[in-house]
Image (cartoon, rainbow, N blue to C red):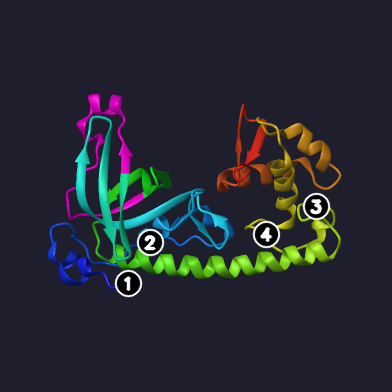
Amino acid sequence: MWNDQSVAGGGFFNSPNQFGNAATPNQAQKTGRRASRTAPIVIRQALHCGDDGVKIWGTEIQIVSVVARVRNIRTQSTKITYTIQDITGRMRAVLWLDQDAMDEDDKSAPRIQVNDYVQIFGNVKTNKGKKVLMAFKIMPVSDVNEITFHYLQCINNKVKMEADSKKEKIVTNNVISSGLPVNSMVGMADNNQSVNGLNARQMMVFNLIRASNLEQGISKDDMYTTLKDRMSKTEFEQILDWMCGEGHIYSTIDEEHFRATDAF
């Protein structure tokens, strides 16, 4: 599809020792708009993103997943720099090493060799005008099907995010046409539309957290004081716990103060 000669001419089929299993990978597919904060991409998307990182249909992707072939490895005392390539392009990936862990156990560095296929989780940064994938985790690919599966995930995720983006635009236009601010909580209690993976009740809490401009975020007590006429304390606590678990919000100075993950 992307006409990559490295795969077509001498790809993974010439490296039988890396792949011991040809079964279809058993991976669960997340659904819903909230899963967009972690997304599979191809290298071309990373190379052509802006300085603010990868975005797909206007949604910022905080953590990306890339499946690629290692073309070069440069090991230094504090980091390992990989040159990686897939069927859309080539770039560098940098993995910073935990020096303390290395002193105790030399297995802390991933066992990766040139021409191995790997899956890398990280975020895309700009360094001296070039895009670099700052890796959090690197894993060798042990199943050839994972490579094809990754490309299918990239296509499927982009199509789903396009559809979700159009739905959100319709909801936003409906709110604006009703004369209410986009982030207003007024009238949301009876709205069953899902925005950004959140239902109307969850959006009431999320909008309060996102609206706070305090560095430490908004406190749980202040939120419930505003919402106590709209929902019970039990429901409020359940919504907070769920949004924390899904990555929409995070606690700051203690377990009583929260900020939204997109509030920067």
Mark 2 or 3, closer to the camera: 2
Label 1–label 2 contact, CB within 8 A? yes
Q: Is residue 127 visible?
A: yes
The residue carrying mark 1 is: 2
Label 1–label 4 contact, CB within 8 A? no
Give the residues in magenta. Answer: 94-120
Q: Residues within 10 Å of mark 1 (few under 14, many from 20)?
A: few
Q: Quadrant of residue 10?
A: bottom left
Q: Residue at x 59, y 43 (%)?
A: 261
Whole-percent x and y of residue 216?
A: 66, 30
**Quadrant in which the C terminus is drawn:** top right
Q: Amino acid at mark 1?
A: Trp
Q: Amino acid at mark 2?
A: Arg
The residue carrying mark 3 is: 184
First of labels 2, 3 by sequence position: 2
* 176 or 108, nearer to the observer: 176
Q: Residues within 10 Å of mark 4 (few under 14, many from 20)?
A: many
State the SS at label 3. loop
First of labels 1, 2 by sequence position: 1
Q: Amino acid at mark 4?
A: Val
Q: Residue at x 19, y 66 (%)?
A: 11
Drawn side of residue 34 relative to residue 146, left or right: right
Q: Residues within 10 Å of mark 2 (few under 14, many from 20)?
A: some
Whole-percent x and y of residue 156?
A: 46, 69
First of labels 1, 4 by sequence position: 1
The residue carrying mark 4 is: 195
**How far apart in space, not on screen, are marks 3 and 4 (Cα)?**
13 Å
First of labels 3, 4 by sequence position: 3
State the SS at label 2. helix
**How far apart in space, not on screen, are marks 2 and 4 (Cα)?**
29 Å
